[in-house]
Amino acid sequence: MHDLIRTEGLKLHTLRSPWLVLGAAPVLVTAGISGLVLSRTGPLDTAAQSGALAHVGLSSLFTLVFGILVVAGEYRHRTVTDTFLSVPARRRVIGAKLALSAVLAAACGVVSSAVGLAVAAAWWADKGVRFDWSDATMWATIGGGVAWNAAFAAIGVGVGALIRSLVGAVAVSLAWVALVEGIVGQLVGNLARWLPFNAGQALGAGASAMTRTDLLPRWGGGVVLAAYTVLFAVLAVTTTARRDVS
């Protein structure tokens, strides 16, 4: 498995689009924190720190697309046939993609967190407010955001394996987040809290100012998101093993 993960890493090293997607995550975090500070009418307090760093979790949209690219990109460029000819054990190939995507997405979350902390501390200093580095809630928010990034990358691998069309998989995923979860949240109420993006919000934002009152508690969001991650990982492995490549 170690050699397979290394091989998948070498493949990604030759591509530009997955790294551009991950590189956009710190930009989103920077823009989100700056927008929060500039639009805030009240003073910057400790609670605002968690709200600012909750943007780390929102970068999971980029890691979701990254996970899709890892699988669906191979189908688009028709390199998947060579991959499965080289390693006929398809389950192991998908397992390597899942592991590598989750690790790289977690690393992306850590980088985004570091950038977010630097930007937030700079804004707090600019406003003449002391930045509380010992705030436990803020660090829990950061940890949840990193986990959310990793989970959505694995879910992206599952979506890419199920749909296989790169454009279709990305379109369906973003439409689900923007339309389905939003519409369900407005029409059905508490059902929306059990859906993937809202579970991620509960894990990655917790009780920060960015969240709504109808989300699960942080631990509940983590459990639900972990269940979705396992589900999509199993679907990715089983469908890839059974379906024709072409």
Image (cartoon, rainbow, N blue to C red):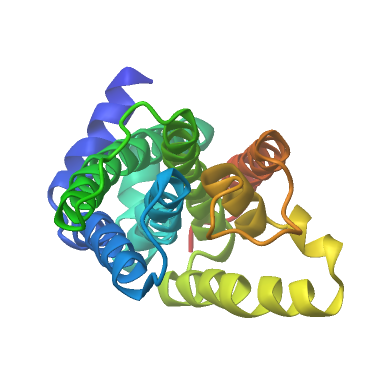
Front one among 81 and 206: 206
Q: Is residue 139 left or right of residue 221?
A: left
Q: Is residue 216 visible?
A: yes
Residue 205 % position (x, y): 53, 49
Looking at the image, residue 56 lies above or below residue 7: below
Percent across and percent down for residue 160 are 49, 59
Report which quarter residue 194 is drawn in: bottom right
Q: Quadrant of residue 223?
A: top right
154 horizontally vs 233: left or right: left
Q: Position of residue 98 (x, y in %)?
A: 45, 38
Judging depth in this view, the residue of 208 and 192 nearest the camera is 208
The image position of residue 188, as x and y in percent, is: 87, 73
The reply to whether residue 88 is in sight is no
At horizontal 31% and vertical 71% (from top left) the residue drawn is: 35
Which image quadrant is residue 110 in?
top left
> Could you tell me which residue is drawn at 76 percent across and 72 percent down?
185
